[in-house]
Amino acid sequence: MTLGKEELGSGERDAADDYVPSQRRRDRERYKRARARRATAIGALSTLVTAVVLYLVVVSAPGWPRTKETFFDPGYAREALPKVLEGLWLNVRLLLICGAAVLVLGMLIAVARTLRGPVFFPLRFLAAAYTDFFRGLPLIINLMIVVLGVPALRLQGVTVDPVLLGGTALTLTYSAYVAEVFRAGIESVHPSQRAAARSLGLSNRQALRYVVLPQAVRRQVPPLLNDLVSLQKDTGLVSIGGAVDAVRAADIIVGRSLNYTPYIVAGLVFVALTIPMTRFTDWVTARMDRRQAQGGAI
């Protein structure tokens, strides 16, 4: 019997190897390839035409020579690039440290907001007040209050380092946004999941840890990555306290030369740093959408 199955399986494999698509299928595949090539060619042509039109509009503007000299000077660009890259290392470190702190604090706040029972009302109230306050407070004002206000208090043992204070302000603001993302993920998990976990003997805390949170976090990966992309850009705001990051390094050269090319260099460096994470976020989002469309676990 086993031999017969093996022979049958071998015959099926041979039949699969000898499969020849029909003429209709070959025509359909040929049409799809031709359509894809046509769409690619049209897209490339339209992009080229748009770029040429924009270039002609910009270079034909009356103030273009002065703008080119002020914002696109190659000499100042070469001078600014090494200093901007040196300052960028501070932005990267802030992203890594603040990003980890934001995820942890945001998760704790989200869990506090979803605790059940009247005994946890004060905790839920404080968590809701925290998210409402820091989501409504502009980040730039939060940075000014923390970076400039805390040193003015002259508290013993409290740092006056603008990098640490700026990172604290970023963490306070972004943890409020991330907390709402986590809370949305927790509330999106169907109550039957928690009920099934409880029926298996898990406590409320164990059901939250092993059943609810893994599903909630997995569902909220794309918006979490978007928040990290925004945090990556906003690390440049710590320069308002005097921290020499990429933006401040460019600002020093601008203040000395009165030429704004270093700002363009710093902006392009941030764009180059942000694009890979943005594309990764798009890839994760598309992948999860495909899995959801196919009925897979999300």
Image (cartoon, helix red, strand yellow):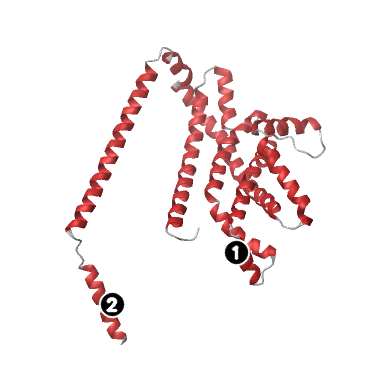
Counting other residues with Cα less than 10 Å from the Cα at mark 2, is it few (<14), some (14-19), or many (20 or more)?
few
Q: Looking at the picture, which amino acid does disc 1 mark?
A: Gln
Residue 224: mark in rendering = none
Judged left or right of residue 228, residue 42 is: left
Residue 255 in the image, given as x and y percentages of width and height? 58, 19
Counting other residues with Cα less than 10 Å from the Cα at mark 1, is it few (<14), some (14-19), or many (20 or more)?
some
Q: Looking at the picture, which amino acid does disc 2 mark?
A: Gly
Task: List the residue tagged with mark 2.
Answer: 9
Judged left or right of residue 80, residue 30 is: left
Q: Residue at x 48, y 42 (%)?
A: 278
Q: Residue at x 27, y 84 (%)?
A: 4
Residue most toward the left?
Answer: 23
From this view, report whether residue 21 is shown above or below residue 154: below
Residue 193: mark in rendering = 1
Quarter of the N terminus within the rendering: bottom left
Q: Nearer the viewer, mark 2 or mark 1?
A: 1
Q: Secondary structure at mark 1?
A: helix
Residue 128 in the image, given as x and y percentages of width and height? 71, 45
From this view, report whether residue 37 is shown above or below residue 87: below
The answer to which of 207 and 170 lies nearer the viewer is: 207
Quadrant housing residue 48 = top left
Q: Residue at x 26, y 81 (%)?
A: 7
Mark 2 → mark 1, Cα distance in angstroms: 41 Å
